[in-house]
Image (cartoon, rainbow, N blue to C red):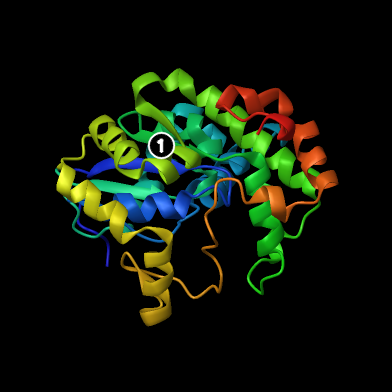
Amino acid sequence: MTPPAGALPRLLFLGGCPRSGTTWLQLMLGALPGVRTGRETHVFRVYADALLRGYQSEAALRSDDGIRHLFDAARFEAELVRPMVETVLRRLAPGAGPDETLLEKTPSNLRYHDLIARLFPEARLLAIIRDPRAVAASWKAAAGEAWGAWTRKPIADVAAGWVTYAEAAIAAEVAGPRFHLVRYEDLHTDGPGVLRGIAAWAGIAADAGAIAEAVARHRLPAVKQALALSGRVGGLAEDRPNFFRRGEVAGWATELAPEEVATVEAVCRPLMARFGYGPAAAA
């Protein structure tokens, strides 16, 4: 059944390099009043991007056939791509009204900041960034899990992926007040303060009590306990063992070999300082 038409809720997209705390932040935000969320949709990376690549590939056909002759690029996005994404979002949170916030978390959202801005200029994009050495340590640990096949990459490739997301965050800053960046480390040390800032920026009406409760309920020990008891946390099912780890800010110092730390820093150093991350000798 097609979801009923009507005004969309306030749109808040969340992204960041995988294993940077996007799910943890989503759980906290999803516990605030008036926020609706759900599982990752990958709607931009997998579906919208495929439509756009198909449209662009027709340029090489030198034929009068194809959609390009029926829609210019702007109309293609407005009349085909945006409605498809809207349908996905409405199914993610059925019945969500214009006074609510729909939070869609997929890590790759950050890489599609420009497409999101074109399709949904009214939306807000939230990103989280984490020390690339901690990201690499998390990927390394995940590679040993049955669900972690996608993380089995050389450390240099993981570091290069972090750079891609860091560069996307810098580029997304041109969106001005529609873009907001937080650091994993700040969420760890001052969760209520970070959530207050996000709520104020995103127009989420949440008082100090609601924010404090959202943080307390989703501290990592509480998250792990909830998963152990029911396999669910924050209304979301999660059956991947050890998906949530220790959550330590500097655990990478003991989890990565010195040569792995050196590799990450060699790849990421030009951007690390931009986000407040110093080299190992100064960490």
Residue 251 pos. (x, y %): 62, 51
**Above or below 56: residue 271:** above
Residue 105 pos. (x, y %): 42, 50
Quarter of the image holding residue 269? top right
In terms of depth relative to the viewer, which is nearer, 127 or 266?
266
Instruction: Give the labeled residue for mark 1.
Output: 126
Query: Which residue is at a point 20% across and 56% down the rendered structure image?
Result: 4
Residue 237 pos. (x, y %): 40, 72
Q: Does the image show residue 71?
A: no
Q: In what element is the residue under mark 1?
A: strand
Residue 107 pos. (x, y %): 52, 47
Query: Which residue appears farthest toward the bottom when viewing the image?
Result: 229
Left or right, 246 with reference to 144: left
Query: Which residue is at a point 15% across and 40% down the rendered structure image?
Result: 205
Left or right, 258 with reference to 95: right
**Above or below 280: residue 90:** below
In terms of depth relative to the viewer, which is nearer, 53 or 200?
200
Dot 1 amino acid type: Leu
**Above or below 186: residue 230:** below
Quarter of the image holding residue 30? bottom left
Q: Residues within 10 Å of mark 1 (few under 14, many from 20)?
A: many
Which quadrant is home to the N terminus? bottom left
Quarter of the image holding residue 166? top right
Query: Which residue appears farthest toward the right when viewing the image?
Result: 259
Which quadrant is home to the C terminus? top right
In the rendered picture of this protein, how many numbered marks are placed on residues?
1
Q: Does the image show residue 37?
A: yes
Query: Which residue is at a point 37% across and 40% down the rendered structure image?
Result: 190
